[in-house]
Image (tube, rainbow, N blue to C red):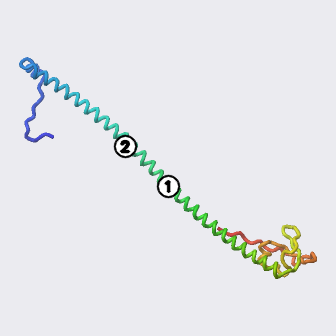
């Protein structure tokens, strides 16, 4: 930076340089060498500045690309977090359904044991059109076990008791 009151030398003109070369050839040679050196320094500075500008543009484009990739990865991460949350919820619901089915299975097993121990009556019933013996007694037409099995109950002699098919239970809603 220049000082405000400093005297600045103006460059020598070509004619003044020739006059100095006649009187003091060493000084003129040094001035010419300094001018060439200054030109080389200016060119080198321009080249360096140009290279820095190119590097800056390259780094700027890489930063923009990295920023875009970062945003894409953030969106993908949010998507995966949401998917993971949904899968966890689905797993939780599935476990609850399994536990519910296991508890129903246990209740049905208890009912079967009850009927096997306390009701030794032999009877016939149909399951899917096949005759089955020793299922459940005739007086259990409306029991929950018969309803869950979807049975049509017959008298031991083979005659239809009420000729009604018990309804199947409705599946669990999610």
Identify the residue at the far right of this view.
Answer: 157
Which part of the image, by quadrant, shows the C terminus?
bottom right
Q: Nearer the viewer, residue 36 or 137?
A: 137
* Residue drawn at (79%, 72%) of the image: 149
Tags 2 and 1 in contact by the CB under 8 Å rule? Answer: no
Identify the residue at the far left of this view.
Answer: 23
Question: Quadrant location of residue 150?
Answer: bottom right
Residue indicated by mark 1:
77
**Position of residue 16 measured from the top left corner of the image (x, y, whole percent):** 9, 22
* Residue drawn at (39%, 42%) of the image: 61
Q: Nearer the viewer, mark 2 or mark 1?
A: 1
Question: Quadrant location of residue 45?
Answer: top left
Task: Give the mark nearer the N terminus: 2 vs 1.
Answer: 2
Q: Residues within 10 Å of mark 1 (few under 14, many from 20)?
A: few
In screen coordinates, is 27 left or right of 77?
left
Residue indicated by mark 2:
60
In screen coordinates, is 49 left or right of 16?
right
At mark 2, the secondary structure is helix
- How many numbered marks have been drawn onto this rendered protein structure? 2
Label 2, label 1: how far apart the Cα atoms are: 25 Å
* Residue drawn at (25%, 29%) of the image: 43
Question: Quadrant location of residue 120?
Answer: bottom right
In screen coordinates, is 115 left or right of 98?
right
Which part of the image, by quadrant, shows the N terminus?
top left
**Position of residue 47 measured from the top left corner of the image (x, y, whole percent):** 29, 32
In screen coordinates, is 38 left or right of 166?
left
Q: Nearer the viewer, residue 144 or 109?
A: 109
**Position of residue 12 measured from the top left corner of the image (x, y, whole percent):** 11, 26
* Residue drawn at (92%, 75%) of the image: 158
Q: Nearer the viewer, residue 135 or 141?
A: 135
Q: Nearer the viewer, residue 4 or 103?
A: 103
């Amino acid at each position: 930076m220049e000082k405000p009151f400093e005297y600045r030398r103006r460059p020598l003109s070509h004619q003044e340089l020739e006059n100095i070369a006649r009187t003091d050839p060493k000084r003129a040679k040094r001035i010419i060498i300094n001018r060439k050196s200054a030109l080389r320094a200016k060119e080198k500075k321009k080249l360096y500045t140009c290279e820095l500008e190119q590097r800056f543009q390259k780094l700027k484009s890489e930063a923009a690309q990295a920023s875009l990739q970062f945003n894409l990865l953030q969106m993908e991460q949010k998507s995966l977090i949401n998917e993971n949350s949904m899968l966890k919820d689905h797993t939780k619901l599935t476990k609850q359904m399994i536990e519910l089915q296991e508890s129903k299975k246990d209740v049905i097993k208890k009912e079967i044991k009850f009927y096997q121990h306390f009701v030794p009556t032999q009877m016939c019933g149909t399951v899917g059109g096949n005759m089955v013996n020793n299922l459940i007694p005739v007086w259990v037409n409306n029991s929950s076990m018969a309803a869950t099995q979807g049975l049509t109950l017959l008298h031991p002699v083979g005659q239809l008791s009420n000729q009604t098919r018990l309804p199947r239970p409705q599946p669990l809603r999610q």
